[in-house]
Image (tube, rainbow, N blue to C red):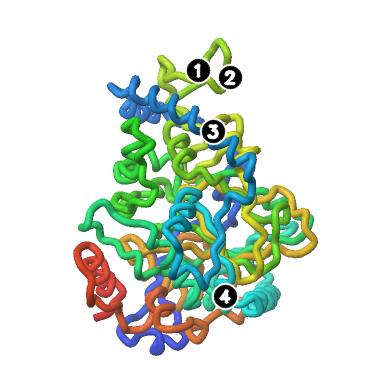
Amino acid sequence: MLSLRLPIRNLAAATSKRSVVIPATQKPAGDISSVFPSLSGVASAPLQPRFATLKSKFLKGNEEQLQASWDRLTKALKREVEEIGEMGTKVIPTIEYKDIANASPLDIAEIKRRGTVVIRNVIPEEEALQLKADLKDYIRQNPKAKAFPAASPAVYELYWSPSQVRARSHPSLLKAQTFLMSMWHSSSSATQISVKHPLTYADRLRIRLPGDAGFALGAHVDGGSLERWEDPEYNAVYKKIFQADWENYDAYDARHRVNATMDLYNGAGSCAMFRMWQGWLSMSNTGPNEGTLLVNPLLKHATAYTLLRPFFAPSAANPNSLSGWRIPETTTPEFPGAVPAASQEFNDKWHPHLNLSKTMVHVPRVAPGDFVAWHCDTIHSVDRIHKGTGDSSVLYIPAVPLCKTSTEYAVRQRDAFLAGVPPPDFPSGDGETGGGMGGLSDVLGGEGRRAMGLGNDGWSLEGLEGGERDIVESSNKIMGWN
C-alpha cells in the first residue's frame, strides 16, 4: 500500500515515541449520499444467486419453528405498533445529565427497551452555541469542503474543526457515553471488551437550514446490511432470532459484536469501530418536523423483523394482507432493503408490518447541549422537510467501547488527525486545507487524550479482570503506550 509521511504539528506534545505514516486512503472522494441508494438515486443490481443459497442455510430443517416464530412476532408487532401510535414522541425516554449516575433500574430498562434516549444538559447551552458559532467560521475558512446536498449544504465532510475535537473529548460527553455503554454486557467473561474506556470516533457535522428537503434520509440501520446474514460472527449476534426464539434475544450482549465484520464490501458508509450507540450533540433548539431525527422505538421487535423478513412473503391469493405470510417454496436471493456496500434501508413496501408511518417517531425537542443516542440496531431517519424557522445543527458523536478492532482503527484515526487528513472510514479529499483546523490544544483532559490515542499515558490495569483486563493491556500496546 502506498503511504505518505506528513509534517505533524506539535507531535512531541502528542507522543514522543511515534512517527506518523498515513496510508493512502482507499475511499473515493464523495459525500454522505454515497452511503444510501435512496439518497444517491443510484439503482442497485439484483443480488447474485448465492444469496438464495445463503437463505436456504438458515431455513433448512428450521422451517416450522421459524414460521411459528414469525407468526408470534407479527402478532406482537401489531400490539406494539398500536401503542407507539398512541404515545408518539412521548415514548422516547429522557434523563438529565446530572441524574445519570443515579439512574434507576426502571429508567435504564426503558432506555434499553426503546433503544433511544435524550440526555439533557450534557454540556452548558452557551458552550454548545459557541461550538456552533466557531463551526460556522470554520466552514467559511474551508469553502472547498464537500457537503450534501451540494445546492443547499447540510452535512459537511469536515472532521477536525476545533469544535468537533473539543466536543468529542469533553469530559461530560465521555461520562454520558460511559453511562450508555454500561447498559451492555457480554455473555462470556473472556470477551475482550471494556465499556469503561470510551474511544473517540471522528464523524461529520450537520447544519440544516429551514426549508431544506434535500437531506431527506429515509428509514435505515447502519452497520452494514447483508453482513448481518453473511458474516458468521455478525449473524451469531442474532442467534436467538435465527433459532426461532426472538423473545429471548439480547440486543445488549457484545460477545459476538466485537468480532463481527460489518463491512464486507468496503462500503462508503462502513464503520471500522464498534458503535454501541450512535449519537449526536445538539447545537440548536430543534423540535419535531424541524429537520430532526426520527427513530423506531421497537428495538427487539424491529430487529427480529429485520432479520426474519427475507425468509417470508405474502400469500399469493391475498398479496396485500399482512396476515398469512409464509416461507415460499422457492427461495429467492432477495433481501429487502439490503444491498452490498450500503446501509440496511426500510420502507412500507419492503417492511409493511413495521407500519413506519406510525412507528417512526420524532425525538423530543432538544436544546443546545443535549445529547441524543440510539442503539446501533435502531431504525432511524431524518425529517424529509425542515419546517422550522431555525437551523438544526448537530455534531455526530457515537459511543465506542474499547475492543481490538476499534483500538486498531483509533491508531489510524489518530494519525489522520495529527496529519490533518480525513479519517480512514470517510471519503478522501482536501476540504480542510483552508486553515483553522483543530489541534492538540483543543483536546480536553487526560481521558479525552486517551480516547483519541494521544499522549504517552495508557489506561490503568488496576482492578480489572478477565477479558476487560486483556483488552486494556493489549490496547495500551497497540496505542504505543507502556
Spatial CA distance of label 4 from label 2 is 49 Å
What's the amino acid at mark 3? Arg
Are dots 4 and 2 in contact, CB under 8 Å? Answer: no
Query: Residue 324: which numbered mark, if any?
Result: 1
Residue 91 is situated, as x and y percent measured from the top left of the image, at 58, 49
Q: Read off the residue under disc 2.
A: 321
Q: Read off the residue under disc 4.
A: 123
The mark that comes first in sequence, 4 or 2, is 4
Residue 190 as seen in the image, left or right of residue 185? left
Point 65% across, 70% down: residue: 368
Point 50% across, 77% down: residue: 170
Residue 17 as seen in the image, left or right of residue 430? left
Spatial CA distance of label 1 from label 4 is 51 Å
Picture quarter containing residue 367? Answer: bottom right
Are dots 2 and 1 in contact, CB under 8 Å? Answer: yes
Question: Is residue 422 at all visible to an observer of this figure?
Answer: yes
Picture quarter containing residue 208? Answer: bottom right
Local packing at callout 4 (Cα closer than 10 Å; few below 14, some 14-19, many 20+) is many
The mark that comes first in sequence, 3 or 1, is 3
Residue 160 is situated, as x and y percent measured from the top left of the image, at 54, 74
Spatial CA distance of label 2 from label 1 is 7 Å
Q: Is residue 69 above or below residue 285?
A: above
Residue 362 is situated, as x and y percent measured from the top left of the image, at 64, 51
Are dots 3 and 2 in contact, CB under 8 Å? Answer: no
Question: Is residue 269 at all visible to an observer of this figure?
Answer: no
